[in-house]
Image (cartoon, grey):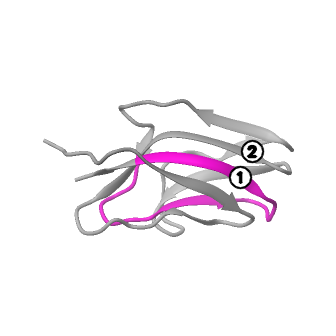
């Protein structure tokens, strides 16, 4: 049976594709259990397991000042592969800000 860490939080502060949560070590996955973000200009966003890695979501088009909210969900929305970082891929180079709630799954 999987074990879970306490919920951890990280800010989202990107203007290009980047890492939201670093890889957590051998056998450990990152599971997203909540999130909110604001996109300053129209672009598409997607979450990946690993840098330019496996897509965890499809491309999501957000308009200028668009908001994406994933309310708290104990089961989670998606998770990385073991020992993979969580990446937010942006189609543009404009500011995306917010916060992410996540747990380690091992």
In the drawing, does residue 86 fall left or right of residue 90?
Answer: left
Q: Residue at (40%, 36%) from the top-left corner?
A: 76
Nearest the viewer among 61 and 2 is 2
The residue beneath circle 2 is 38
Distance in Å between CA atoms under marks 2 and 1: 5 Å
- Is 101 in the magenta? yes
Please give the count of numbered marks on the rendered protein: 2
- Towards the viewer: 18 or 13: 13
Q: Quadrant of the N terminus?
A: top left
Where is residue 90 shown, x and y percent of the image?
69, 59
x, y percent for residue 56: 48, 49
Q: Earlier in the sequence, mark 2 or mark 1?
A: 2
Within 10 Å of the Cα at label 2, are there few (<14), some (14-19), or many (20+) other Cα atoms? many
> Horizontal and vertical percent for residue 68?
67, 37
In which quarter of the view is residue 18 placed?
Answer: bottom right
Judge whether 2 appears above or below 92 on screen.
above
**Which secondary structure lies at badge 2?**
strand
What residue is shown at x 29% (from left), y 48% (from top)? Answer: 5
Q: Residues within 10 Å of mark 1 (few under 14, many from 20)?
A: some
């Amino acid at each position: 049976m999987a074990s879970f860490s306490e919920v951890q939080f990280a800010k989202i502060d990107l203007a290009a594709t980047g890492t939201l949560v670093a890889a957590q070590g051998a056998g450990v996955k990152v599971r997203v259990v909540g999130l909110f973000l604001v996109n300053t200009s129209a672009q598409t966003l997607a979450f990946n397991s690993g840098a330019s890695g496996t897509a965890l979501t499809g491309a999501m088009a957000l308009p200028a000042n668009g908001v994406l909210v994933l309310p708290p969900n104990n089961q989670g929305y998606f998770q990385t592969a073991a020992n993979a970082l969580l990446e937010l891929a942006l189609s543009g180079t404009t500011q995306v800000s917010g916060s992410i709630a996540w747990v380690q799954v091992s």
